[in-house]
């Protein structure tokens, strides 16, 4: 045993105990794995070199943000301000605003610049106990720029205190070079970008934006077929603004998750249930766009579809680098329970990234990814925003102290 955490109150989320807190627990870590997790009476820590007394801290699995667009350049705050000053959206778009302004800035930025910007945003997530983050491309929309974004995401994953899963989202928006010809762009994504990303091992999954203002269900299916040919997992931005049947299509093709899904109908929910696809809810975008259409939470519950929660951190619709704010929003807007929210950023988020075998729970054999909190009840994680409650994180067995925490 390399490290033993003692005097903790632990929530394992391993399915046997659920949300239940195990008091007076201990966790033993060997290299990067959990070797023991349970009540202290089942374990003897005498003679272990590195015993950390956590002084009654609450310990959860490290939180997982399973949907972000953390890598980009540029700033949409002025656009935000213009809109609030009454400038019509068409005028902003005509002047080069909107997503294409982010595309332009991202294309112009170097890998080093993108890395520095993304690292800073990531700090917000780390301060909220995040130990694993998914990062998408999708602001390059050329072969070189999409690969550049993915290389930056992989480089972030080399930091010792974060795990990164990368997703190629070349089918995010139509690049200006293809403005009259979406089918040719989709062909290019399938024939050039996906094979190159796969060959360089830059992507773990492939994502699409299936929407009236994005790509059709048929075009997204074509992208998914190409992804499968190269052994990449599938994810989708689906049913965010309308119901095109993209979620059901993605689920039937074996997608890990479908994300947003405010407009998902009963048939779509049934497809997720039948195919074991995770429903990822993104309350930050719902909030920022001042949406009214609620995702079908009750139907998802009824059919036991696992629900994940993520930040969707991005410059246009969710500039909020806080997973705990998302947990709170999922409670206030979607009426999810704090228990569902905690599952949504641990076990279910791990499933949305195809990692449930080794992340998202505290049990023997799992990666030692933990969040250690100055909290007495897990509901506080969803209840409170902005108080620095995090004491430390353990990432792959290594301990990272968060200095601002005191009690
Ligand atoms: Fe997104």
Image (spheres, helix red, strand yellow):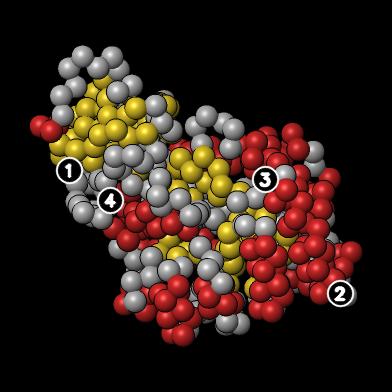
Binning the other alpha carbons within 10 Å of mark 3 as few (below 14), some (14 to 19) or many (20 upward) gives some
x and y percent of residue 158 in the render?
Answer: 59, 33
Is mark 2 in CB contact (under 8 Å) with mark 4?
A: no
Q: In 3D space, how far apart are the residues under numbered discs 4 and 3 (Cα atoms)?
A: 31 Å
Q: In 3D space, how far apart are the residues under numbered discs 2 and 3 (Cα atoms)?
A: 29 Å
Residue marked by disc 1: 22
Q: Which-is-in-front pick, marks 4 and 3? A: 3
Image: 352 above or below 45: below
Q: Residue at x 50, y 54 (%)?
A: 353
Image: 373 above or below 384: above
Q: Residue at x 87, y 68 (%)?
A: 178
- Helix, strand or loop at label 3? It is loop
Q: Which-is-in-front pick, marks 1 and 4? A: 4
Horizontally, residue 326 falls left or right of residue 41, namely: right
Tag of residue 14? 4
x and y percent of residue 92 in the render?
Answer: 79, 65
Q: Residue at x 68, y 46 (%)?
A: 202
Q: Nearer the viewer, residue 110 or 123?
A: 110
- Helix, strand or loop at label 4? It is loop
Q: In 3D space, how far apart are the residues under numbered discs 1 and 3 (Cα atoms)?
A: 40 Å
- Helix, strand or loop at label 1? It is strand
């Amino acid at each position: 045993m390399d490290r033993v955490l003692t005097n903790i109150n632990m929530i394992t989320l391993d399915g046997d105990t659920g949300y239940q807190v195990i008091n007076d627990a201990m966790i033993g870590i060997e290299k990067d794995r959990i070797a023991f997790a349970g009540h202290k009476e089942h374990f003897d820590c005498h003679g272990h070199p590195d015993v950390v007394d956590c002084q009654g801290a609450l310990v959860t699995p490290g939180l997982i943000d399973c949907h972000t667009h953390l890598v980009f350049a540029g700033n949409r705050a002025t656009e935000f301000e213009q809109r609030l000053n009454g400038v019509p959206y068409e005028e902003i778009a005509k002047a080069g605003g909107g997503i294409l302004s982010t595309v332009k800035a991202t294309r112009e930025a170097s890998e080093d610049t993108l890395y520095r910007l993304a690292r800073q945003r990531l700090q917000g997530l780390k301060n909220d106990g995040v130990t694993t983050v998914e990062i998408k491309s999708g602001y390059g929309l050329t072969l070189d720029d999409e690969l550049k974004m993915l290389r930056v995401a992989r480089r972030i994953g080399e930091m010792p205190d974060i795990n990164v899963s990368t997703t190629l989202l070349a089918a995010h928006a139509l690049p200006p070079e293809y403005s009259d010809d979406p089918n040719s762009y989709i062909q290019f994504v399938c024939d050039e970008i996906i094979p190159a990303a796969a060959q360089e091992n830059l992507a773990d999954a492939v994502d699409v934006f299936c929407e009236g203002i994005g790509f059709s269900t048929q075009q997204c299916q074509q992208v998914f077929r190409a992804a499968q040919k190269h052994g990449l997992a599938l994810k989708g931005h689906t049913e965010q603004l309308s119901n095109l049947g993209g979620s059901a299509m993605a689920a039937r093709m074996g997608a890990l998750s479908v994300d947003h899904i405010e407009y998902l109908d009963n048939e779509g929910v049934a497809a997720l249930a039948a195919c074991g696809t995770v429903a990822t809810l993104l309350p930050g975008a719902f909030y920022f766009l001042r949406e009214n259409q609620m995702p079908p939470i009750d139907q998802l519950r009824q059919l036991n579809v696992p629900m994940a929660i993520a930040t969707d951190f991005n410059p246009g619709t969710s500039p909020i680098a806080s997973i705990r704010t998302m947990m709170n929003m999922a409670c206030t807007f979607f009426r999810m329970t704090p228990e569902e929210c905690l599952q949504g950023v641990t076990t279910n988020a791990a499933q949305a990234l195809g990692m449930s075998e080794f992340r998202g729970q505290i049990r023997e054999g799992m990666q030692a990814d933990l969040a250690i909190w100055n909290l007495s009840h897990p509901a506080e994680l969803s209840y409170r925003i902005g108080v620095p409650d995090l004491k430390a994180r353990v990432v792959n067995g290594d301990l990272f102290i968060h200095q601002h925490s005191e009690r």
